[in-house]
Image (cartoon, helix red, strand yellow):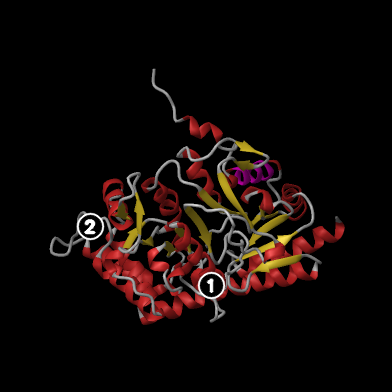
């Protein structure tokens, strides 16, 4: 008799965004004459930067000739892209990252979910609340938690992120082995200062812990005092793994390209107390279970670093940030406290009521989709996340509908 992985049965009934999709589908089926504007899931809407499109076409043309055709590429990514990442994203900001410490992948979601495989089953987790659900759910699947009680899984050290701490979790008194951090934050849009990140690096060094730092939204940081990488903090190379993505930077959600940085100086220990470089472990996992990102997509990603690509991607992120400014300003005018929207494409709104109730109100009365904060954790209750990823026309129309709906509520 074959048995299932019973850890999957501990998961909550459905994945947050699948639950949202189900509710929206039910509404649209029942109300075919009421078009819905989606400001919930963080999917981009604007076309790819022209420099990336040109590189994609050129690489596709290469595949049409025997002289330039390419089959399997290196699972870790082509050197031309890894070298650009190391130089432009890190060296130019004073961070010492080597090209072979960069692993190209098809998405930060995948890497954030898969990285836990190289760690022991009995490690202690520290995870913020509210948080991107993948961090929690993949560890539940792996058997590192007990059942969910009161909206939280047993065995996780939850790091409360609330208005009291500016939605940046405080360093805990208790030790942990694996710490998840995300800045600019998804879902709150909050950013961490250099001093706050330094405190986490110090914590990791004291406890021989590893920080998993998700910086998928770093391209939206406009405040020059805010770090864009954990590696801008002294000592972080020895305690942190960083995840980045081209999805929100250059609109690659449908193209699928990201990368993870694992410094060769970063180690963890076995039961006997012997140190093992995590770079080697991740390289083995990556090359065993992943075939690499396609050559044309990697060429398109490399074009992000060209002179034209840098100008075009900056314009793209500026466009979404202007959407975010409009959303935050309007929600503020309606009387809601908000964070995010200035260095991040998300606005975290304190709605002062049940978050799913507010979700339903906006869907039914305004035909606007947001994301209920309760889906990101217990501390997310009473909040919603509004995404800036849509056309300007749709954002302005959605804000008009929201205002009208709330004034009638």
- The local secondary structure at tag 1 comes to helix
Residue 303 vs residue 101, the one in the foreground:
101
Image height check: is 143 above or below 76? above
292 with respect to 15 (left or right): left
Residue ID at (39%, 21%): 2
Question: How far apart are labels 2 and 1 at the CA level?
Answer: 31 Å
Whether the magenta-drawn stretch holds residue 260 is answered as: no
- The local secondary structure at tag 2 comes to loop
Predominant secondary structure, magenta span: helix
Task: Return the residue found at the far top.
Answer: 1
Which residue range is magenta in the image? 19-29
Q: Residues within 10 Å of mark 2 (few under 14, many from 20)?
A: few
Image height check: is 385 above or below 196? above
Is residue 363 in view from this perspective?
yes
377 with respect to 6 (left or right): right
Q: Quadrant of the N terminus?
A: top left
Q: Quadrant of residue 15?
A: top right
Q: Which residue is mark 1?
A: 220
**Mark seen at residue 73:** 2
Image height check: is 397 above or below 365? below
């Amino acid at each position: 008799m074959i048995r299932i992985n019973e850890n999957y049965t501990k998961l909550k009934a459905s994945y947050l965004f699948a639950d949202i999709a189900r509710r929206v589908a039910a509404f649209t089926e029942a109300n075919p004459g009421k078009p819905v504007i989606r400001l919930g899931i963080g999917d981009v809407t604007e076309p790819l930067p022209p420099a990336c499109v040109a590189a994609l076409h050129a690489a596709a043309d290469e595949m049409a000739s025997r002289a330039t055709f390419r089959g399997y590429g290196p699972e870790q990514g082509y050197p031309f892209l890894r070298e650009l990442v190391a130089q432009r994203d890190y060296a130019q900001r004073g961070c010492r990252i080597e090209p072979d410490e960069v692993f190209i992948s098809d998405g930060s979601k995948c890497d954030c979910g898969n990285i836990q495989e190289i760690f022991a089953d009995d490690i202690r987790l520290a995870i913020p609340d509210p948080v991107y659900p993948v961090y929690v759910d993949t560890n539940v699947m792996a058997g590192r938690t007990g059942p969910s009680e009161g909206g939280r899984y047993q065995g996780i050290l939850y790091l409360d992120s609330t208005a009291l701490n500016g939605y940046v979790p405080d360093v805990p008194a208790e030790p942990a082995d694996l710490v998840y951090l995300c800045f600019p934050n998804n879902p709150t849009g909050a950013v961490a200062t250099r001093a706050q990140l330094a405190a986490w690096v110090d914590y990791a060094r004291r406890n021989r812990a590893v920080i998993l730092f998700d910086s998928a939204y770093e391209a939206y940081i406009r405040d020059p005092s805010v770090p864009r990488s954990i590696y801008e903090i002294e000592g972080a190379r020895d305690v942190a793994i960083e995840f980045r993505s081209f999805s929100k930077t250059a609109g690659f959600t449908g193209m699928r390209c990201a990368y993870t940085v694992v410094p060769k100086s970063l180690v963890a220990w076995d039961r006997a107390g012997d140190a093992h470089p995590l770079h080697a472990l991740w390289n083995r996992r990556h090359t065993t279970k992943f075939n690499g990102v396609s050559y044309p997509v990697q060429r398109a990603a490399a074009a992000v670093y060209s002179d034209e690509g840098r100008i075009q991607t900056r314009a793209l992120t500026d466009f979404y940030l202007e959407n975010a400014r409009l959303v935050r300003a309007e929600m503020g005018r309606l009387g809601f406290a908000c964070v995010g929207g200035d260095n991040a494409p998300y606005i975290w709104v304190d709605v002062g009521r049940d978050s799913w109730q507010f979700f339903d109100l906006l869907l039914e009365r305004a035909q606007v989709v947001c994301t209920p904060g309760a889906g990101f954790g217990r501390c997310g209750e009473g909040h919603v996340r509004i995404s800036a990823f849509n056309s300007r026309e749709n954002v302005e129309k959605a804000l008009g509908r929201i205002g009208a709906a709330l004034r009638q509520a």
